[in-house]
Amino acid sequence: MNQWERMDKEYVWHPFTQMKGWNENQQLVIDHGEGVKLYDTEGKAYYDGISSLWVNIHGHRRQEIDTAVKNQLDKIAHTTLLGLINKPSAELAQKLVEVTPEGLNKVFYSDDGSTAVEAAVKIAFQYWQHKGRPEKQQFINLGDSYHGDTVGAVSVGNIDVFHKVYKPLLFNTQKMTCPSFYHSKLAGIDSEADFLTYLLDELEACLQEHHNKVAAMIIEPLVQAAAGMLMQPKGYIKGVRELTKKYDVLLIVDEVATGFGRTGKLFACENEAVCPDMMCMSKGITAGYLALGATMTTDEIYDAFLGEAADYKTFYHGHSYTGNPLACAAGIAGLEIFAKEKVIENLPPKMAVITEHMQKMQAMKYVGDARQCGMLAGIELIRDKERRLPFEPSLLMAGGICQTARKYGLIVRNIGDVIVFMPPLASTAQQIDEMLCMLEQAMQEVFAQIDSHNEVKFSDPCAF
Ligand SMILES: *Cc1c(COP(=O)(O)O)cnc(C)c1O
């Protein structure tokens, strides 16, 4: 154990981590990164197969972004947005308005995905008060939704393992069926088309009854990543947009995970030409360099907050590091790379490599569903495919495969029984192929152990 591992285990409490298992097992210390690889203190290289938890876009130590941050550092590291302007936050806001769906013309900055959602929830709530409809206070959300870990974001979230314990602290929401067909347990609905109809009918029934009390609906468009890469039927967000418009309910899309190219378009909404009333973004907004969140709104929403100081229509919300110049400088440089290198246009051959591997994995004995949306993929394990029987959670099967993959030089992470694959967009088709070959090796190794009836039990501190 090197000195950093010792210090870590003595002093650091890790996020989403059972610290008992963490402290009992050997852990990796990352020393540096280069491109799409991470290097540990021994100099061993690993592919960053989860984009450093879904944030990295153009690779590590991208010269253009490094330079932009260093140049900004030579001017000033931080100054407040309360009462002052800074250059990078103004410039990034202009760029964000340019690249996001039509109608999103204002940018409210915050610190991360959770605070971007927190701000959206409060803006929606306050908006209806300003519009003279203070009874519109409720929120509609999805089963298995995830919007961050602050209390407001947890209230509009719906993942039992993470959220159940906090229930007494949370406000109530109208919960819709999780739009993942693979996980649907609805009797008599056996095609994705029927499932889509069911979901939209359910939403319309809820809106019909409650729209006078509902401020907004919040969804993760196309992919519910944190729930385990759950994917929605084609046409779902388009249908949600039409219904929320029809019933005068704001639509908040949380693009914190799906934004900045992950689904094959710059924003997931673009896949179905959806223009939301608000969009939350973070993770990829600084290309994975620094913490920054943004909540974008329409003029209609922004204008409702205008008035004299004495009208008390101000949005009384803000964070100390709001619009941090270093983070915004990284964000501008990241967007410039998207344009200069045609990052989105170059994704299809990379996505095709993922598709090829998902088909291969789908044929494996213990893979229930290998699914993909653009550059996002999830491989869900299952003990018995026919009867849909899951592995004993205590086996930590997916976590064990992720742990084994490190041996082959790949960092990935699981969510329950789902192995998440989310490489930086900068990965080449060949690198993606190598990463997925490594993952397949790890899967085969673990599956062989199951087949030979060896006792397989992993103690992966990463798993939950
Ligand atoms: C990660 C995530 C969040 C929370 O973002 P943080 O920066 O971790 O606070 C919110 N929504 C979605 C969809 C996410 O994936």
Image (cartoon, rainbow, N blue to C red):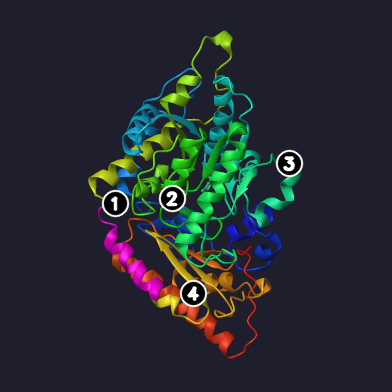
Query: Left of 68 or right of it: where is 111?
Result: right
Question: Which residue is disc 4 drawn over?
Answer: 407
Amino acid type, mark 2: Thr
Q: Spatial distance from mark 4 to mark 2, Cα to Cα?
A: 29 Å
Q: Nearer the viewer, mark 4 or mark 2?
A: 2
Which residue position is annotated with label 3? Answer: 169
> Which circle's residue, 4 or 3, is located before the other in the chain?
3
In the picture, the disc for residue 151 is: none
- Report the residue at 67% width, 55% height from top: 160
Residue shown at 62%/32% (left/top)? Answer: 213
Name the residue tied to disc 1. Answer: 344
Point 48% across, 41% down: residue:
243
Q: Nearer the viewer, residue 64 or 204?
A: 204
- Considering only order in the chain, which callout, 4 or 1, is on the residue closer to the N terminus? 1
The yes-or-no answer for disc 2 within 8 Å of ligand 1 is yes
Which quadrant would the N terminus be assigned to in this image?
Answer: bottom right
User: Which residue in the protein does label 2 denote?
Assistant: 258
Residue type at tag 4: Lys
Residue 217 appears in view: yes
Relative to the observer, which residue lies in front, 197 or 365? 197
